[in-house]
Image: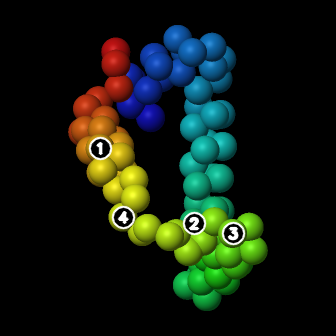
Amino acid sequence: MVKSEELWYERNMIKNASILRKFEDDLFRSETMRSAEQSLQLFTGMWNEGVALGVLPPSDPWEGIDVDIRIAGILNSCLTKSLPD
């Protein structure tokens, strides 16, 4: 873990940043170990749920695309900036 992350955790009342970082790393590794078949099953199930709720497929697939693009730009710019010291 880099020093700036440790300081961020300390300022935000995380008492043992190394334990939290290990937990996050382990959680990330365990959650990303899905096969392509499992991912497709998950997507299909979520899609079917959306259809059953009447929210999918969208009536206008382009509706809200401008907001999505703006949010993506903001998130991408955040990823290129470092954490505050």
Q: Kindly tell me whether residue 34 is visible in this rendering.
A: no
Mark 4 secondary-structure assignment: loop
For label 2, the residue is 32
- Residue at 63% in and 65% down: 55
For label 3, the residue is 54
Quick check: 76 above or below 17? below
Quick check: 62 above or below 23? below
For label 4, the residue is 62
| Side of 5 where 52 appears, left or right | right
User: Which of the 4 image quadrants contains residue 65?
Assistant: bottom left
For label 1, the residue is 70
| Side of 66 where 54 appears, left or right | right
Q: Nearer the viewer, residue 49 or 16?
A: 49
Q: Say whether marks 3 and 2 touch (CB < 8 Å).
A: no
Label whose residue precedes the other's in the sequence (1 or 2) = 2
Q: Nearer the viewer, mark 1 or mark 3?
A: 3
Amino acid under disc 1: Arg
Quadrant of the frame with the N terminus: top left
Mark 2 secondary-structure assignment: loop
- Residue at 61% in and 44% down: 24
User: Which of the 4 image quadrants contains residue 4?
Assistant: top left
Outermost bottom residue: 37
Label whose residue precedes the other's in the sequence (3 or 4) = 3
- Residue at 35% in and 26% down: 83
Spatial separation of the CA atoms under disc 3 and disc 2: 29 Å
How crowded pointer 1 is (Cα within 10 Å; few <14, some 14-19, many 20+) is rated as: few
Q: Say whether marks 2 and 4 touch (CB < 8 Å).
A: no
Q: Nearer the viewer, residue 48 or 53?
A: 53
